[in-house]
Image (spheres, rainbow, N blue to C red):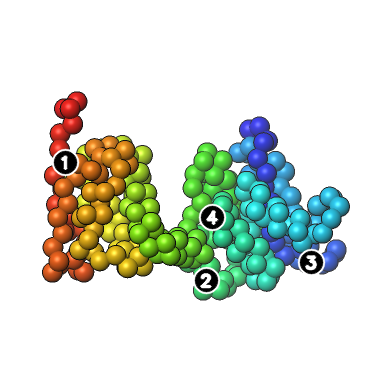
């Protein structure tokens, strides 16, 4: 077992003592969630009814929903408290694993997101434990949290809300992603930049697409391997609304090292 230096919080329907919901929650926590996450360095998962600290329970729950390194959300019974806490977690774009009992009909807003079904028979429990373990390992190794409707909307709003700055930030983030992947050849820039993200940012910023050329040439050269200042960009006024990236004429100038 890996060292336990990361926290895990479980949000789920709990129910009153001796209720069916409590018995199911205890079983899932003990036999499915706990062994799956502990194998990857997470401490024993905590549930809201296990919080012993003095204070307001609602505040303590939200603190843990925000602060935990990993949250596991059991959407069985479609409990409104669970959905509220899940939305809080997703708003911060932090790692969350969503699970639900087999046969649960999930609402449209979450139905398209990755969900791990579980059953209480041995085979179903083992499969759910395996899949939770895979996601826990991904997050323990620094993997990014998946997108959600909340994080996606927040990203678009942030890009569009600040006009020019938002558009520049989107473009720079795409170029930085290109660098992280080790693709330092600007001849491939048009194929790897995300046309949809840049187009969304520009539409929200109010910047005429025909002005993108001058915008790019003003960016600092340290923003990219070859320097955007060395990238000659020409944009056609007539075609700018249809295919913005096809209008980027890329002529990377050789550096002194070359």
| Label ID, residue 93 | 4
Q: Earlier in the sequence, mark 4 or mark 3?
A: 3
The residue that label 3 is drawn on is 15
Q: Is residue 198 left or right of residue 58?
A: left
The disc placed on residue 252 is 1
> In terms of sequence position, does the residue under pointer 2 or pointer 3 come before the other?
3
The Cα atoms of the two marked residues, 2 and 3, are separated by 24 Å
Mark in the foreground, 4 or 3: 4
Q: Say few, some or many: other residues with alpha carbon within 10 Å of mark 3 (under 14 / 14 to 19 / 20 or more).
A: few
Splitting the image into 4 quarters, where does residue 61 fall?
Answer: bottom right
Q: Secondary structure at mark 3?
A: loop
Foreground pick, 229 / 244: 229
**Residue at coordinates 26% horizontally, 49% vertically from top-left?**
218
Q: Mark 2 or 3, which is nearer the eye?
A: 2
Q: Nearer the viewer, mark 2 or mark 1?
A: 1
On-image quarter of the N terminus: top right
Vertical comparison of 155 with 129: above or below: below
Q: Tell me which residue sits at (28%, 59%) in the image.
A: 195
N-terminal of the two: label 4 or label 2? 4
Q: Nearer the viewer, mark 4 or mark 1?
A: 1
Marks 3 and 1 sit apart, C-alpha to C-alpha, by 63 Å
What is the C-alpha distance between the residues marked 4 and 1?
A: 36 Å
Q: Residue 68: give x, y in percent of width and height.
A: 66, 48
């Amino acid at each position: 077992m890996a060292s336990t230096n990361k926290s895990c919080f479980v949000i789920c329907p709990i129910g009153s003592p001796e209720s069916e919901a409590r018995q199911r929650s205890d079983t899932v926590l003990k036999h499915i969630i706990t062994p799956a996450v502990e194998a990857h360095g997470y401490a024993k998962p905590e549930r809201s009814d296990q919080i012993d600290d003095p204070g307001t329970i609602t505040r303590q729950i939200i603190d843990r929903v925000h602060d935990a390194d990993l949250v596991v959300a059991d959407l069985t019974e479609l409990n409104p408290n669970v959905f509220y806490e899940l939305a809080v977690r997703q708003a911060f774009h932090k790692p969350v694993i969503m699970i639900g009992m087999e046969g649960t009909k999930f609402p449209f807003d979450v139905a398209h997101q990755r969900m791990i079904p579980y059953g209480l028979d041995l085979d179903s429990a083992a499969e759910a434990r395996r899949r939770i373990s895979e996601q826990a390992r991904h997050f323990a190794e620094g993997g990014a949290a998946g997108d959600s409707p909340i994080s996606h909307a927040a990203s678009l709003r942030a890009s569009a809300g600040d006009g020019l700055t938002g558009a520049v930030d989107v473009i720079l983030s795409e170029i930085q992603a290109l660098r992280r992947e080790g693709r330092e050849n600007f001849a491939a820039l048009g194929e790897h930049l995300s046309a949809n993200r840049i187009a969304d940012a520009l539409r929200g910023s109010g910047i005429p697409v025909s002005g993108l050329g001058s915008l790019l040439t003003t960016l600092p050269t340290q923003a990219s391997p070859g320097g955007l200042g060395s990238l000659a960009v020409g944009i056609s006024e007539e075609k700018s609304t249809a295919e913005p990236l096809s209008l980027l004429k890329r002529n990377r100038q050789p550096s002194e090292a070359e």
